[in-house]
Amino acid sequence: MRRMALAVLVGAALVPAVASPAAGKVPRGFFGVVPQASLRAADFDRMQGMGLSVRVPIYWYEVEPRPGEYEFAALDRTVEEATRVGARVLPVVFGSPSWLEPEAARPPLGPALSSWREFLARLVQRYGPHGELWSEDPNGTPLHRWQIWNEPNFPLFWRPRPSPRGYARLLHAAATVIRAKDRGATIIAAGVAPVEVGMAPWTFLRRLYRVPGARRDFDVAALHPYAPYLGWVREEIGLVRSAMAAGGDRDKPLQLTELGVASDGTFPSAFDKGLTGQAAFLRRVLRLVADNRHRWRIAGADWFTWQDSSAADPHCVFCEFAGLFDASGEPKPAWAAFRSVVAAAPPGMQPRIRH
């Protein structure tokens, strides 16, 4: 998942960063990671026993490259490896296939919605409760959480331009199918990010809430609070929570499905903190979120990303170097910082989501 550099200067009052009485005691799976590339068995071995959430992209165009032909092998391996080490998979479904739309970022609206529904039904049939995969692997953990699309407020991921009303149609179709197949499913809205070109997250959400019935189609909202300073992270969370309250969703959980900074950059940027600076920022921001998770009603926080990329990203000044490991797989100081934060937060009960 990629995005452009943060370019938002917000002036709202900061959300207080006062620790709650249960500071640090987060549910198992509260902390997670977002890989840029496919994870290997050795990557999952490193997660053993940490109780992490792993946000895994399900690219429609890869899984169903031709109508009605499904290629599940790679996704099966990822889900099974996660189960093996006790990690929770959070799938994010995105990317129209070329047989349906000319661009992956062009959403399947109009007549294409029927194919979208069929694809999601097929995913739940394979990975949900009583899924086909679990008949082959009875010790596996069925998927109940589904995130629908990625950053629809950003033209890179939603062509030709962001449309809260269009996203509401896509989300409604997805929620209807998934809930019909799994009454216990949790629908997570697409993460919205403060990008240079596009619609501000809080503006997108305010407009989404104006669509009749839209708020009933997701159980958890999502934000990608990219910022090089903790104060900006607080402001973004505060502005999104205000938009949710205005839409009648004051008590709905909010998940931070991407956040992070880098240890280097393609050119000078405030997101480039250096090796030790990245680790220090990671430690501070994850502790901030954990300490205030009740106040801000945070359902989880996922670090972008697991490992540095071996290629530059033309749409992002820092994504190439945002990993916990470098491109060769060697751990950076951020990995030790991440492990220390996770280890210092004793696991509590799993959060209960109201449907």
Image (cartoon, helix red, strand yellow):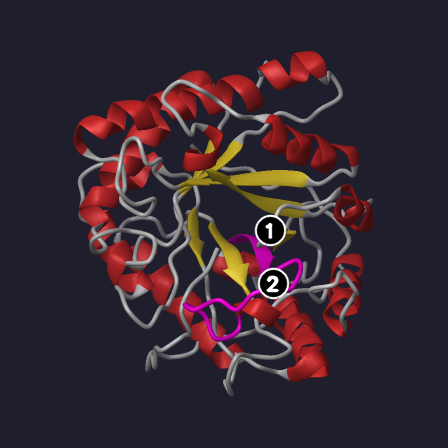
Question: Residue visible at 76% across and 38% down?
Answer: 86
Q: Secondary structure at mark 1?
A: loop
Asked if residue 278 is positioned above or below residue 307 in the image, the reply reads: below
Using the rendered image of the protein, determine whether residue 252 is visible from the camera's viewpoint. yes
Which element type, helix, strand or loop, lies under badge 2?
loop
* Horizontal side of residue 64 vs 290, given as left or right: left
Decide whether residue 98 is among the magenta residues: no
Q: Looking at the picture, which amino acid does disc 1 mark? A: Ala
**Picture coordinates of residue 56 (x, y %)?**
56, 43
Residue that carries the numbered disc 1 in the rendered image: 37
Of residues 165 and 17, which is closer to you in this image?
165
316 is within the stretch colored magenta = yes
Residue named by callout 2: 309
Q: Is residue 143 left or right of residue 327?
A: left
Residue stretch rendered in magenta on the structure: 298-318
Residue depicted at 56% across the width and 79% down the height: 265
Query: To which quarter of the image does residue 283 belong?
Result: bottom right
Determine if residue 128 is in view: no
In the rendering, at what x and y percent does residue 292 appear? 57, 64
Residue farthest along the bottom direction in this orientation: 268
